[in-house]
Image (spheres, helix red, strand yellow):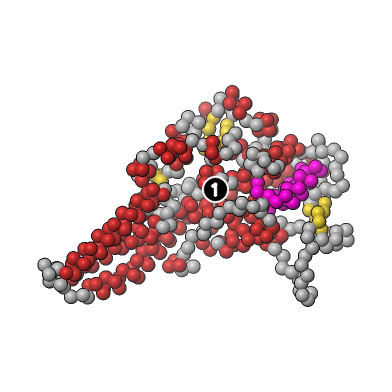
Amino acid sequence: MSILFYKPPDYLSKSIVPISTSQCDRYIERASGSARAIPPGLSFEAIIENKTLPPCSLSDFMDYLFYIEHSIENLQFYLWHRDYQRRWNMLSEKERSLSPQGQTTLPIPPAKKSQGHAAQKPSVATTLFPLETEDAKTSPNEVSFDFPNPRNPDVSNQPFREECDFIVRKYILNDSPRQMNLSQRDRDIVLGGLQDTTHPSVFNPILRVAEATLRGQSHLNFVRWSICNGNKPRTIGVRTNAMFWTVVGLVAEIILILSRAARWWRILVALLWLLSVTAVIVSFNGLCLLLYVGRAHEIRPWEVDDATSERGRRFSADSTVGAPTIRLASKMAVYPASSQSELGDGERSIKGGLTYINSIGYKESWEDSTWEESYKRKPLARKVVDKSVWIQEESLRKLQDKIVLKAFIWCLIIIVPVTAGLTAIPKGNFF
C-alpha cells in the first residue's frame, strides 16, 4: 500500500449484545481486511506467542484489555485453552479415553430457501471452527458438535474435571466474575457438553467467540492504541503548540510580504510550517513528534501507579521462594502467605494450569485499581511532561515512521506550491 494513503486500523467498540455467529464472521473478515495495515511483527500470532517487545508484548496486550477495553476475559480464556490443549495432548491414551470426543446435536433455525441448486458459501466462522454433520442421523436443521453422546455415567475420574468446573464458574455461567459475552445457545451447548466430557473440543463454541473477538476487534484496537506514544494531555498540548507556531509563521509571511525584505526570506517560514503542520497531523494519530524523535513513549498511568505502590513492586526470583505469586494485570507481585486467603477456592485448590486465570490476581474488576484516582489528582503540567521509556518493538517504530513520513510528504505537497506562490508576490515596501 502506498505510504501516502496508509491508514491505521479503525477503532471498533466492543459489542454490548451477545456475540453471534454472524458477528464472528464480521470480526474475522475485518481482521483479514486489516492485515495489510499491520506488519507481520505485530500480527495476532506474534503477540499471542509473546514474540513482540514492549510496548506491544503479550503483557501489554493484557494490560490494555484490562485497563482500557475492560474485556480481558477473552484473552484469558483463549490463552488458557491453548495451554489446556497442550496439557491434554501430553496425557496418556488411557487418561484421554476417560473423556472421549463424541457428538451431540442441537436444533437450529431452518435455512432460507435459495433459488436454484447453487451451493451456499460457508461462513468464515464455520471455516475456522468446522461443525461436523451426520447425513444419516442428523436432520438438515441440526448441527453436530464434538461432544459425547450418550451421557457419560461417571465424570469424576475424567482428567482436569476440577479445572473445567472452575472455568465454568469463572467465565461461562451467568453473573460469573469474568462472564464472557456469549449467546445463550453457545453457553447451553458448552454446559451440556461439560456434563459428559472434559475434552478440549467441548469449549469450541466459546473458543470461536473468543478468538474472533480478539482477532477482529481487540488486537486491531490494541495496535492502533500502541501507535500513540503520548497521553491525551500531552498530545493536545503538542497540537496546540504546533498550531500556534503555524499561525506565527503565517503572520511572519504576511509581514515579510508587506516589508522591503528580500523575498527569499519567505522560504524560511516554509521550514517552520513543515515542522508545525507535520506535528499537528501526526497528533491526530496520537503521536507526539518530540517523543517520536527520541523513539520513546510515555509511561502508562497504571504503570506509574504500580511503580510507586507496594503491591505492584517487582521482586527478584530469589525473593519469591515460598510465597504465592500473583499477577496484577501483567505485573508480577509477591504476596505473603496470609494473602492467599484472598484467592478463590478454585484458585487455591488447583495446582496447575491456571497461569492465565490468575493473571489478574484476585481482582475481578478494573475499578478496583488505584491508578485512575491517582492520575486524576496529578497536576496537568505533570501529565504533559510525564516520564517516558524507550520503544523496544521495531515493528511499532516502523509503523510510526510510516505515519510521520506520510504526514511530512503531504506537507511538502501542500506547502511547497503555497510557498512558491507567496514568494512570487512582489514586495509591498510599506516599511
- Pick the front one: 52 or 245: 245
Quadrant containing the C terminus in the rendered view? bottom left
Residue at 65%, 49% in the rendered image: 181
Per the image, is 76 magenta?
A: no
Residue 302 x/y as whole percent: 47, 40
Question: Where is mark 1, residue-wise?
Answer: 69
Q: Quadrant of residue 323?
A: top right
Residue at 66%, 52% in the rendered image: 18
Above/below status of 123 relative to 315 = below
- Pick the front one: 30 or 160: 30
| Magenta segment boundaries in residue numbering | 180-208
Residue at 40%, 54% in the rendered image: 287
Residue 75 in view in this figure: yes
State left or right for residue 430 relative to residue 242.
left
Residue at 64%, 55% in the rendered image: 212
Residue 348 x/y as whole percent: 66, 30
Above/below status of 419 relative to 83 = below
Residue 198 x/y as whole percent: 76, 43
Residue 45 x/y as whole percent: 59, 53
Outermost top residue: 338
Q: Secondary structure at mark 1?
A: helix
State left or right for residue 226 relative to residue 261.
right
Inspect the image, locate mark 1, and give the three-letter code of the amino acid beneath it. Glu
Per the image, is 184 magenta?
A: yes
